[in-house]
Amino acid sequence: MKTNREREILIVAINALLESAYDSTLDEIYTLLKTIEDEEDEEDLKAVKEAREEIRLHGTIFWEEIKK
């Protein structure tokens, strides 16, 4: 995970590139980012379901396992 400063630098660099991008490129970037976000949401939901099933089958689980 990046530090806040690293994130700020990266966001500024990305914004500079976005300012000069064609509209069609912006559309493609938006679609790609949305797809990535949706996939991450699906992965999060799957992990929650798996954790719930693990609890149902074996009782409580350790926090370290949930974080994985």
Image (spheres, grey):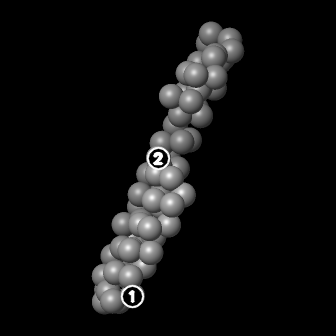
Label 2 – label 1 distance at C-alpha: 26 Å
- Residue 39: mark: none
Which residue is depicted at the point 51% across and 61% down? 5
Q: Picture coordinates of residue 56 (x, y %)?
A: 66, 17
Q: Which residue is mark 1?
A: 19
Q: Which residue is mark 2?
A: 1
Which residue is depicted at the point 44% across and 75% down? 12
Q: Picture coordinates of residue 21 (x, y %)?
A: 32, 86
Residue at the limit of the structure toward the right, as seen here: 60
Q: Is residue 20 above or below residue 39?
A: below
As shown in the figure, which amino acid type bears the numbered disc 1? Glu
Which residue is depicted at the point 41% across and 66% down? 10
Q: Is residue 30 visible?
A: yes
Pointer 1 local density, CA inside 10 Å: few below 14, some 14–19, many at least 20: few
12 left or right of 65 in image: left
Q: Is residue 53 above or below residue 13?
A: above
As shown in the figure, which amino acid type bears the numbered disc 2? Met
Q: Picture coordinates of residue 15 (x, y %)?
A: 42, 79
Pointer 2 local density, CA inside 10 Å: few below 14, some 14–19, many at least 20: few
